Amino acid sequence: MSGALLIGGTSSDAGKSLLVAGLCRVLHRRGLSVAPFKAQNMSNNSVVTADGGEIGRAQGMQAFACGLAPSTRFNPVLLKPGSDRRSQVVVRGVADGWITATDYHSRRAALADIVASELASLRGDFDVVVCEGAGSIAEINLRATDIANMGLAAAADIPVVVVGDIDRGGVLAHLLGSVAALPPEDQSRVAGFLINKFRGAQSILDPGLRQLHDLCGRPTLGVIPWADDMWLDAEDSLSSPIGRAIGPSIPALGSQRITVAAIRLPRLSNSTDLEALACEPGVDVRWVDDMASVAAADLAVLPGTRATVSDLAWLRARGLDAALIDRAAHGRPIVAVCGGYQMLARRIDDTVESGGGVVDGLGLLDIDIVFDETKLVREVRGHLDGAGEDAITGYEIHHGRLTRPAPHPHWIVDDDNGPEGCVVGAVWGTHWHGLLANGAVRRAVLAEVADRVGKTGFVVAPDTDVDAARMAQIDLIADLFTAHVDLAAIDGLLADGVPRSLPTVTLGLAPASAPERHVGSR
């Protein structure tokens, strides 16, 4: 088999990223060489590739599903929003300036050429390339500059399957309207639908699927059920609302549990750091944005952010700075990562991200931060400072630099770059993302937290494997895909490409004249 397919959506957060991962895993299990591809992603959640580049977190997860290391080939264009109007552009893994929505069109042609080249290269090297769209396929106001949805499908001559999230309500209208809003040449590539997160009796939905087919002449290739044990977040902060629990909430090994307040910053980035904690038995992690929750938790985590200075101002406006300062004064644990770590400094000098110049940090660590025009992007390896030789790994993605050595004890020692991070009382800080995914680090932090808050009944698990937990989630998606999607139809699209003679749907929605092709789910 060889071929390519685009999984598009009726909206953002419809489930495209997870379903692409599931399909990649299904095909990989068959022994096919499979690669994921997202032409252009907009996300502050990213991972570092082996060659020192940066791609969207979802494509890193999809590569994991394919048995591959993350590569800049899988996400050649990444937009990282620093505000509602301005984003950093990452091209083939390297930061390449800033754009606003209004001046994006000036770079579109060059980016389209890069995307086309990368996709063609992948199709030459792999049996199958599974592409993920961005947002909605029916963002018709953006069609002229689109390189990720129907623009990509047209340029590469590949079929499109559209995903709708039934949990939002109105999924049949979303699917039908998405097709009807497209011009005829784009409609001709939409080969079918997937419905995601279904709960209830399929027999009640089936008449609607038949009517959907009658109106637009496209089959529903599968209805994927809601999975109560699905906790993996595929992409970005859209799936991280205030109050939401993070991770699987595993039963405790002892008589007590540890509570973690994860501060939900407006420009939150790399939230996988929190997932690692949540994979531990007896650890409950939840997104919060209020003083009471930060004060009450056993551990507060100040995560990474794409906008350190503006998110620090947000923190102060909500009184969360006072809650963190009070925690530190009373020996109640805090973990701060990357942008969160920078917020704990005495002062921050930022003429790069915010252009705000010098601002006061929270002053919990005796360090100063200066932002550099050059972004530091690298994988790192080291060991805990003074705590044995267990190898630990992580990655760094940031503009901020420490301008003088920290006078505090260091948290870790980077094998190539020396001491990293700080430990002051019950406050831990580091620029390393992924540090908490290391078992030795995570167990040491949780043991210290339990001791400081007096939870003697909490038992630290000796053998939690975060990577295995994440792969189990991907396998769960693949199992659902196998059980509920017409894989023969998917195989046909990959083998034969765009179906011929698909009817055009008009906004008048007269029934389409096409032979009965409804497949439904198995």
Image (cartoon, helix red, strand yellow):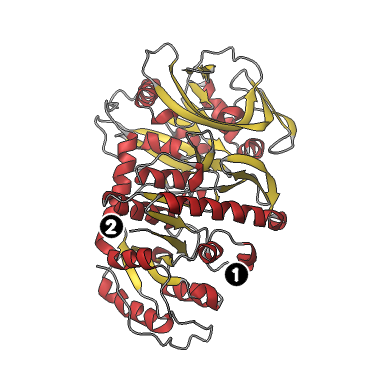
Please state, as top left, top right, bottom left or bottom right, where the C terminus lies in the image. Answer: bottom left
**Three-letter amino acid code at disc 2?**
Leu
Which mark sits nearer the N-terminus, 2 or 1?
Answer: 1
Find disc 2 in the rendering and name its residue.
Answer: 480
Answer left or right for 385 relative to 358: left
Residue drawn at x 42%, y 11% is: 386
Query: Distance from label 2 to label 1 (Cα)?
Result: 32 Å
* Badge number at residue 140: 1
Residue drawn at x 49%, y 23% is: 428
Could you say which is closer to the camera, residue 382 or residue 241? 382
In this view of the protein, can residue 171 be seen by the observer?
no
SS type, badge 1: helix
Could you say which is closer to the camera, residue 256 or residue 95? 95
**Three-letter amino acid code at disc 1?**
Ile
Taking the view exactly as shown, the residue that stands out farthest to the front is 124
As drawn, 474 above or below 52: below
In this view of the protein, can residue 506 be seen by the observer?
yes
Q: Tell me residue 398's x, y (percent).
A: 59, 32
Answer left or right for 65 relative to 154: left
Residue drawn at x 63%, y 19% is: 367
Q: Tell me residue 214's x, y (percent).
A: 38, 84
SS type, badge 2: helix
- Answer few, some or many: residues within 10 Å of disc 1's Cα (few below 14, many 20 plus, some between 14 and 19): some
Q: Tell me residue 310's x, y (percent).
A: 66, 39
As drawn, 370 above or below 96: above
- Answer few, some or many: residues within 10 Å of disc 2's Cα (few below 14, many 20 plus, some between 14 and 19): many
